[in-house]
Image (cartoon, rainbow, N blue to C red):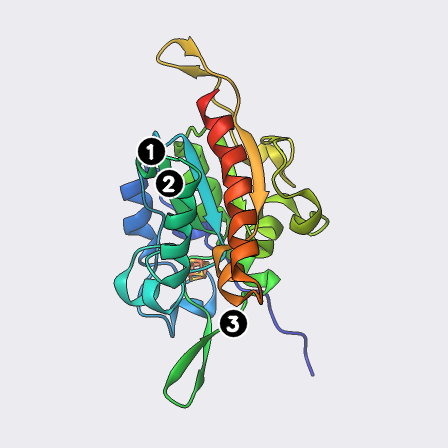
C-alpha cells in the first residue's frame, strides 16, 4: 500500500495581511489544511484579548465547542474555569486556544466520540498557533496536556515530569524561532514570557480520584498566577 500523503497544512490559508486575531479567525474558517474540516461543524479559533497576560493552549475543540464555535465552553472548559477561579486568576487575563482548530471524532451510533489528533494534524494546524503568537504578548504561556505540549515543545517533553515548573519561553519551544518575544510594550521594556505546563482539564474529568487531580491542576495554575503578576 502506498504511504499516505501528509496533509498540505494551514500555511497557505493564512493571509499575509492579517493584522488582528479577528483577521486570523475569519481566515481559519476557510482552512482546508487537513481533512478535519470536512466532518466538523466549524473551526474553533482562539478566544480572548490580544493583550492577555496568559495564553492557554489546549488540544482541540470538543463536541460542545464544535457546535458553539468557541474554545473551552464544554465540560472541560467549565472545570478549567473553576480551577482558574481557585488559583485566583482573573479570567479576563486569559486568551484560550487549541493546538488543533477542528474537532476530530469518530461516530459510535449517534454519538461523536473524541479522537486524539495525530501528529500530522498537529503539524498541519501549527501555522495558526504560530500566527496567533505573532500577535499576542503574554507574560505566561500555559500548555494544557500532552497534545499541546507536542505541538509547542516537541515530542520529548513530558507533562507529567515537568508540570508546574516555570520554564523560559520561547527557549523551551521545539522551534523557538517561530515564537516572537516582545521585550518592548509602549516603549517600556517588559519581561519575556514564561511557560508552565500542566494537565488538560479533561484529564481531571477522566481521573479516578478527581479531587486530587483537580487540586494538582489548581496548584499548577497558582504557579501561573504568581508568574503573571511579576
Ligand atoms: S484542523 Fe487546522 S489545519 Fe486542519 S483544517 Fe482545521 S484549521 Fe486547518
Q: Residue at x 39, y 33 (%)?
A: 135
Q: Residue at x 40, y 32 (%)?
A: 136
- Across and down, in percent, residue 217 comes to 53, 48
The quarter of the picture where residue 209 lies is: bottom right
Q: Is residue 123 visible?
A: no
Q: Which mark is residue 191?
A: none
Pointers 2 and 1 in contact (C-beta within 8 Å): yes
The furthest residue to the bottom: 109
Q: Does 230 appear above or below 93?
A: above
**Which one is in front, 71 or 11?**
71
**How many labels, in total?**
3
- Across and down, in percent, residue 16 comes to 37, 39
- Across and down, in percent, residue 18 comes to 33, 38
Label 3: few (<14), some (14–19) or many (≥20) C-alpha neighbours in 10 Å: few
SS at mark 2 in the image: strand
Q: Which residue is mark 1?
A: 50
SS at mark 3 in the image: loop
Q: Which mark is residue 115?
A: 3
Tell me the distance, in whole angstroms, between the alpha carbons under discs 2 and 1. 7 Å
Amino acid at each position: 500500500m502506498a504511504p499516505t500523503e501528509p496533509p498540505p497544512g494551514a500555511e497557505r490559508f493564512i493571509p499575509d495581511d492579517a493584522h488582528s486575531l479577528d483577521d486570523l479567525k475569519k481566515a481559519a474558517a476557510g482552512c482546508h489544511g487537513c481533512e478535519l474540516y470536512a466532518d466538523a461543524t466549524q473551526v474553533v479559533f482562539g478566544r480572548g484579548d490580544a493583550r492577555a497576560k496568559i495564553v492557554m493552549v489546549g488540544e482541540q475543540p470538543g463536541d460542545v465547542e464544535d457546535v458553539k464555535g468557541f474554545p473551552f465552553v464544554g465540560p472541560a472548559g467549565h472545570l478549567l474555569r473553576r480551577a482558574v477561579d481557585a488559583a485566583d486568576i482573573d479570567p479576563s487575563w486569559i486568551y484560550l486556544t487549541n493546538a488543533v482548530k477542528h474537532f476530530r471524532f469518530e461516530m459510535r451510533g449517534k454519538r461523536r466520540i473524541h479522537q486524539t489528533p495525530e501528529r500530522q494534524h498537529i503539524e498541519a494546524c501549527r501555522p495558526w498557533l504560530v500566527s496567533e503568537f505573532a500577535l499576542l504578548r503574554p507574560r505566561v504561556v500555559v500548555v494544557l496536556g500532552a497534545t499541546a505540549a507536542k505541538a509547542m515543545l516537541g515530542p520529548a517533553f513530558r507533562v507529567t515530569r515537568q508540570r508546574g515548573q516555570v520554564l523560559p519561553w520561547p527557549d523551551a519551544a521545539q522551534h523557538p524561532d517561530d515564537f516572537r518575544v516582545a521585550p518592548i510594550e509602549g516603549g517600556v521594556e517588559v519581561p519575556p514570557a514564561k511557560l508552565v505546563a500542566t494537565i488538560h482539564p479533561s484529564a481531571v474529568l477522566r481521573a479516578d480520584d478527581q479531587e486530587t487531580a483537580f487540586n494538582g491542576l489548581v496548584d499548577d495554575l497558582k504557579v501561573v498566577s504568581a508568574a503573571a503578576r511579576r
